[in-house]
Amino acid sequence: MAQTKDVKFIIYQVLYIFVVCVVAIKGANLDLVEVLSKEKVVEKTYADSLKKFIDSLIAKGIFFKLEVDTNLKKEDLDKMMAELRLKANWVPNVVTTSTPIPPKIDEKKPDEIKPEEKKPDEKKDINISFKGRIIQYSTTTMTNPNPVPMEIYADGKLLTTISPGSSGSFSIQGQTTVTIKAGDKSTTVQTEAKKAPVISMNYIGASGSLRLIQGSPGFIVKIAYPYEDPLDVKITGPVSIKDKGGNSFEVTLRTSCSTKDDFERIYADKGDPPYREVFKVTVKDISRGITTQQSGSFIFSDW
């Protein structure tokens, strides 16, 4: 009986030597193969349990050295295992060096990266400058290039509102200022007084007798008016009119005298020569309702 115990004890010693070899070549595969008869070896379940125990020590970073004591008896095995378990609960002071893990960067593909949407700076983009002329008693057209509505005031009174990106027209009378406002910006423009039409007459006909003067163009009447607003032009008298365009008119004398007798009968009671035939040019500025007049005369002394 004592001999059987001594054999098992020797087997345990050999097994611990084998474990030391395993620790020395860490990572090797521990394979307990049946090399002796089942009657003379430690049960496989016990060996597997010991293998898992040794692996757990290595996993915790515990490296140790085992020496075989030939005087150790079977009765002291339990005490040895208790000491090993106590060591297994000891956490070694292991100094480790690790490389810091950089924070994860959310990388996106170029086609997934969208530029930041820039909101329009309404204050910066507003343009209320006006380089044209605003004439009294006329209509003006403006374009609003701003992202906000543009309001038009005349002497403080709102005339119209022009939507963003649109054009609008407004008419003024005798107001002296027009204010353009968009957002929190505004500018004021001084209006220009509207000039009245100017009538000019240039005589191009013959002189002397009535029979030479009448029937041929005698005057060129021109009306100077630097605006596109329409005019109402009337020329009255013993004349005929031909419109030459551009507010220019050709005026010809037309009397009822076709013979000398007609001349003497009509002009005998008009006193001494020279005699005059007068025509009148009347120009009305429709926008202002103001009329300008001027007269022209055909002068002759006899038939």
Image (tube, rainbow, N blue to C red):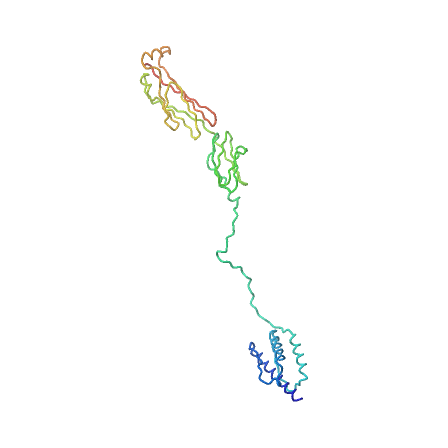
Of residues 113 and 65, the one nearer the viewer is: 113
Position in image of residue 296 (x %, y %):
39, 20
Q: Is residue 201 above or below residue 169?
A: above
Q: Is residue 166 above or below residue 286?
A: below
Of residues 47 and 182, the one nearer the viewer is: 47
Position in image of residue 38 (x %, y %):
61, 84
Whether residue 5 sits left or right of residue 25 in the image: it is right
Q: Quadrant for the C terminus, please.
A: top left
Of residues 107 and 40, the one nearer the viewer is: 40
Q: Quadrant of residue 233?
A: top left
Q: Quadrant of residue 219?
A: top left
Marks counted in the figure total 0
Whether residue 261 sits left or right of residue 58 in the image: it is left
Q: Is residue 296 above or below residue 2?
A: above
Point out the residue furthest to the front here: 38
Whether residue 81 sits left or right of residue 165 in the image: it is right
Position in image of residue 205 (x %, y %):
33, 21
Position in image of residue 118 (x %, y %):
52, 49
Q: Quadrant for the N terminus, please.
A: bottom right
